[in-house]
Amino acid sequence: MANDAATGNAIRVAPTEPGDRDDPVRAVLAAYTHDLSTAVNDTLTTFLTAEVESLAQIDAAIGEFAAAARDAVLVGGKRLRSTFAYWGWRGASGGSESLPPVLPALAALELLHTFALVHDDVMDDSATRRGRPTAHVALAAQHVAAGHRGDPDRYGEAAAVLIGDLCMVWADRLLAHTAVPPARLLEVRRCYDQMRVETIAGQYLDVLGENDAANWSVDRALRVARYKTASYTVQRPLLLGTALAGVSTDAPLVAAYTRYGLAVGEAFQLRDDLLGVYGDPATTGKPAGDDLRTGKPTTLLMLARQLATPAQRRALDRADTGPVDHLAELVADTGAVARVERMIAERVGDALAALDAAPVDRTARTALTGLATAATDRRA
């Protein structure tokens, strides 16, 4: 057992993977992250059970709809955002505060994440997520099975948008259960609202890029990564943690977390771009090559166009007609994959440099070091 400093919050050491004992970073993550995920999942389950029961009293069909939203939250997921928020809080508080009062805020991030995923899958017309049918696909299948009238695909998309909306409302409601002083909760809410605004701004840029690829660039692709992904995956969760701990927004720790979060968040999205083309669908839970088929202007594809020879660029322009495997090889041949790998390494290095100067204790520093690697050097 390990204790969360003076509060005595017991954290059970989770089973380690081979090699954990030889790697102190992985050992700390194995010791802490498992039980944090369990605590977040328990918080979500208790909250969502009551919410679904309440909605089921209106109409049985609404209960089924709410249950589908609950399942979208509880099935799968790394709990990465709540983990970053926890370590942001733990690094700021030094373990001097009890964990249960802040768990609703950590868990609310997972509801917000589900909102973003469900809407993103509708906008991208994605068929699978985490190895399962996406919400709109599953709902369309239910429409067909029930023998309803109308277009099942249109129904699935409309119902999925409502699931995403419900998850955002649930996130707001759960966040309000955070048991910290009112002035501190107000600062938490300000950070949370800014995170939502930035996420939606980044998502709009992502949609615009797909419809205006001719005017896109590497810089704009990175801007999408910064606001669509980095903000609500790493940077703002960390800052939410400092707000939960009552840290002033002009504190040195906030500046260090901001730099670290932006760097790790961008690297996370760059890795996602690579996995979207070269990842194993059995591991990622999503088909490979969709970005190439649609010509989505990711940083990877923008770099490939920038580095390509005229012949390679012509082949990239025919992306929607060529075999995906051939296009993936073509992108790699331009040098874009190697360039993205260097960009990831550079950002991780910058994040660790920011962490070196951050006023956090050894445990939080070790965990955040490990998270920077785990979030950016992954297979799913």
Image (spheres, grey):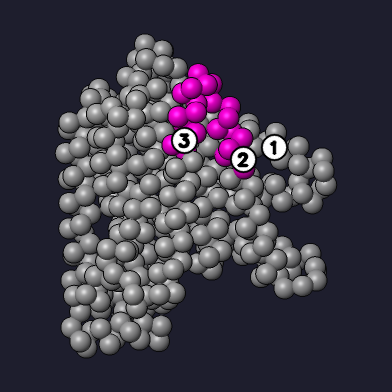
Q: Which span of residues is magenta-colored?
A: 169-192
Which x, y percent locates residue 259? 25, 41
Three-letter code for the amino acid on which mark 3 is drawn: Arg
Say which mark, if any, is on residue 190. Answer: 3
Residue tagged 2: 170
Residue depicted at 79% across the width and 51% down the height:
61
Asked if the stretch drawn in magenta spans residue 189, the answer is: yes
Query: Quick one: SS at disc 2?
Result: helix
Query: Quick one: SS at disc 1?
Result: helix
Which x, y percent locates residue 159? 68, 59
Say which mark, if any, is on residue 51. Answer: 1
Three-letter code for the amino acid on which mark 2 is drawn: Trp
Task: Please state if 61 lies on the left or on the right of 136 as rendered.
Answer: right
Query: Quick one: SS at disc 3?
Result: helix
Looking at the image, do the residues carrying marks 1 and 2 touch, with CB atoms under 8 Å apart? yes
User: How many callouts does the rendering have?
Assistant: 3
Q: Earlier in the sequence, mark 1 or mark 3?
A: 1
Q: Nearer the viewer, mark 3 or mark 2?
A: 3
Asked if the stretch drawn in magenta spans residue 44, the answer is: no
Task: Please state if 373 lies on the left or on the right of 346 as rendered.
Answer: right
